[in-house]
Image (cartoon, rainbow, N blue to C red):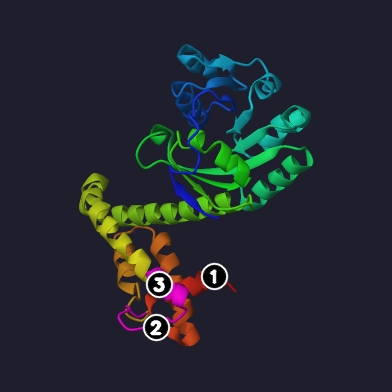
Amino acid sequence: MTHEGNDNGNNTDPGGIRVSVLGLGAMGGALATALVKAGHETTVWNRSPEKAEGLVALGARAAATAGDAVRSGDLVVVCLFDHASVHEVLDPLAGDLAGRTLVNVTTTSPEQSRELAAWAERAGITYLDGGIMAVPQMIGGPGSSVLYSGSADAFRRYGPLLDLWGTSAYFGEDAGLASLYDLALLAGMYVMFAGFMQGAAMVAPAGITASDFASRAAPWLTAMTGAFQEYAAVIDGGDYTVEGQQSLEFSDLGDILAAASAQGVGTGPIAMVQDLIQRQIEAGHGTEGFARVFESIRRPV
């Protein structure tokens, strides 16, 4: 079951739900702010109490302890530093959480998400895992989305509330899927950023600023994302010999590597891609399409 968008089949007014938010870093604070502004009775807690002051001024209630916060909400949202800190805060409160819904938007691995879901099930806690595809300033605005997996009932019941943070997408009962999708999308983002920095480093010795380079790189890279669906169709079809593809041999990045070296800069990002290409060429697939580098990643050995 997959749901995307703001129409999740629940027309209940999202206001009026008692919510507790544990963790008031930049992201946790943004999530809590959206809840307060929407009219929810919101209780907040943070190890450093001063982080709650701005939310209290908006109308939130500050809890003295994490336990007080948990007991104050029907829905408990956790946005902490990491998986270990989630257990550190919540393990002593398993009894208080029983019968409530827990939404964990702390960044965790898929296996950690599944482990926490199993822990919640044993304690009688309804569990929903979330991956936030936004920076704090985007919460509740255009481009913000949050990926969810875990309890379908919780997603349906609290859908209008979840949509306050951004477009909601549900990926099924496997609690690890939202995290997997989240981290996979971030992988693409970081590799793209590293590619931009590779190019910026190459032109810097010529006196070209990173800002000038960005003005040309942004529209170019944006246009190139249109190729994603074409590559996806080839990968899903499993045939890297279909016509119209740029071959791996033609995609050799030796000239780019040489230019970077001549500029006296590192070659790490582009050398990584060259390695993926060369592995497929050496395996006898040089005339096949560039999309075949997917196989170098999928089967690393």
Tag 1, which secondary structure?
helix
Estimate the x, y position of residue 162 in percent, counting from the top left: 50, 36
Q: Residues within 10 Å of mark 2 (few under 14, many from 20)?
A: many
285 or 184: which is nearer to us?
184
Tag 2, which secondary structure?
loop
Estimate the x, y position of residue 76 in percent, counting from the top left: 62, 30
In-image side of 271 versus 217 (left or right): right
Residue ID for mark 2: 288
214 or 31: which is nearer to us?
31
Instruction: Give the foreground label among 3 and 2.
Output: 3
Q: Residue at x 39, y 64 (%)?
A: 270
Q: Residue at x 34, y 72 (%)?
A: 253
Image quadrant holding the C terminus, namely bottom right
Bounds of the magenta segment: 231-247
Kind of residue sitting beneath label 1: Arg
Q: Residue at x 46, y 87 (%)?
A: 284
Residue ID for mark 3: 233
Kind of residue sitting beneath label 2: Glu
Residue ID for mark 1: 298
Estimate the x, y position of residue 12 in percent, counting from the top left: 50, 32
